[in-house]
Image (spheres, grey):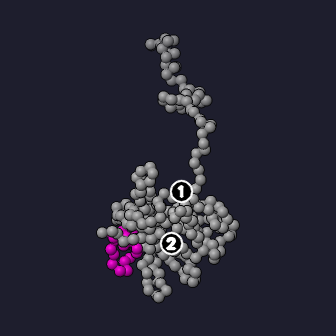
Amino acid sequence: MATLDESTLDTMNNLTDKPALDDPTPNMLNGDDTIDVDYDAPERASGPYVPQVYPGVYPFLFALEDDTPFEVREYDTKKGEHIREFTVNHKATISITDAAGPKEVTIRFNRAGFHQWTDKNGNKLNSQGGELLRSLNIKLPPRTPQAQVKQALQESDSRVMGRGVVNWEAYCKACKEDNRLDATWSGIVSTKPRTKKGDARWPKEHGRYVTEVKCPKCGAELNGRERITDYRLPQE
């Protein structure tokens, strides 16, 4: 029977021996295996999210939200009416150009419900969902079943462009937690031209909206977000 000499055994042991658990060498990247820290460098930027799409009307690529694209929301109006509203939740990707050049920004968690409201004269108004369908140039017959509306929106998912009104909104969680919300203060700061009762208007400086905002009630720093708050007809 053939035997291995000591030199061959030493070679095999060198090939099969595993490093000690506390040996950092196997975790090192190939090439530069040193780490440098500049302890005199300024602190990295931190703070609330700064909106990237300035309020206005923009074309957007329509896409359904991944988790819950459709739902039926239930709520009560101030008049005590109970509403069950079929709703679509969608994303809107907008192309903009800033100081760094052109880029795309995706605004998420936009909501369009299909409940029809009436104006003060009793005339029925188009729902937000109806305005979204018109913006996407989706034409459906009157009293279309929900399943058919879903199918039309699914067929438009990530394929069809619409036009929407972008506004900034911020909500004060601190005021909610401290029970400071009432009929005069909803906790919402918005750039909408027609704010709801209790909402605060987003402040401006030199004729333009500031990018960072504080709660007008408690002074807390708020996180403003872009929202599609209305829809416009497609441009021909």
Frontmost residue, 121 versus 115? 121
Could you tell me which residue is drawn at 44 percent across and 86 percent down? 123
Question: Please, what is the three-letter code of the amino acid marked with disc 2?
Answer: Pro
Residue at mark 2 to residue at mark 1: CA–CA distance: 20 Å
Spot occupied by residue 137 in the image (x, y as percentages of width and height) = 33, 70
Q: Secondary structure at mark 1?
A: loop
Spot occupied by residue 65 in the image (x, y as percentages of width and height) = 45, 62
For disc 1, the marked residue is 50
- The answer to which of marks 2 and 1 sits earlier in the sequence is 1
For disc 2, the marked residue is 193
Frontmost residue, 232 versus 4? 232
- Residue 95 location, quadrant: bottom left
The quarter of the picture where the C terminus appears is bottom left
Let me know if residue 112 is in the magenta part.
no
Frontmost residue, 108 versus 193? 193
Does the image show residue 154? Answer: no
Question: Please, what is the three-letter code of the amino acid marked with disc 1?
Answer: Val
